[in-house]
Amino acid sequence: MCNLYRLNSSRQTVADLFGANDRAGNAPGGEVYPRYPGLVVFERDGERVLEGMPWGWLISLKGKQGQTLNPRPVNNTRADKLMFPFWKSAAIRPERRRLIPVNAFAVVVGEREG
């Protein structure tokens, strides 16, 4: 998956398509950047729901001098990294899986406005 995606469909359309109850509150559609909220479909207590969620897995990194850096969203990986403990634990636990409805995706190049 890439760093930017777009959802042009309405929340009602997505909820209907996946048979989900809309619990997304005021989560927007449109362009979604890392750390910004986007819509996801998942199962909770036997019910399929549509909710808003920040885009990306937030991971903490260390700087060159060992200092803690601000959490960074990671939203893609290579196939050879999928067996690392972090990714493997996410893939094998169904309760951690999310369906991300998109109409288009792209890799952002250059600085983002705003």
Image (cartoon, grey):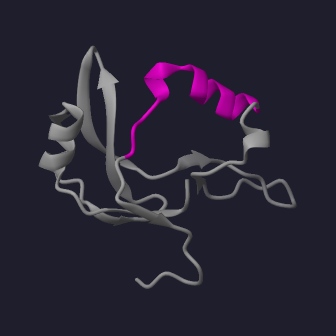
Would you identify the image quadrant in which residue 3 lies? bottom right
Query: Is 50 on the left-hand or right-hand side of 77?
Result: left
Would you identify the image quadrant in which residue 92 lies? top right
Q: Main secondary structure of the magenta part?
A: helix
Residue 50 in the image, given as x and y percentages of width and height: 24, 38
Of the 4 image quadrants, the one containing the C terminus is bottom left
Query: Is 45 on the left-hand or right-hand side of 56?
Result: left
Query: Is 83 on the left-hand or right-hand side of 14?
Result: right
**Image point 20% across, 32% down: which residue?**
20
Query: Is 70 on the left-hand or right-hand side of 62?
Result: left
Residue 5 in the image, given as x and y percentages of width and height: 42, 62
**Image point 71% across, 36% down: which residue?**
82
Q: Is residue 22 magenta?
A: no
4 to 16, vertically: above or below: below
In the image, 114 versus 77, the foreground residue is 77
In the image, 69 versus 98, the foreground residue is 98
Q: Count the marks.
A: 0
Residue 4 in the image, given as x and y percentages of width and height: 47, 65
**Image point 77% across, 53% down: which residue?**
62
Give the magenta-colored segment's residue range. Answer: 84-100
Residue sitting farthest toward the top: 46
Residue 38 in the image, given as x and y percentages of width and height: 34, 53
In the image, 87 versus 64, the foreground residue is 87
104 to 91, vertically: above or below: below
Q: Is residue 86 magenta?
A: yes
**Image point 54% across, 74% down: which residue?**
108
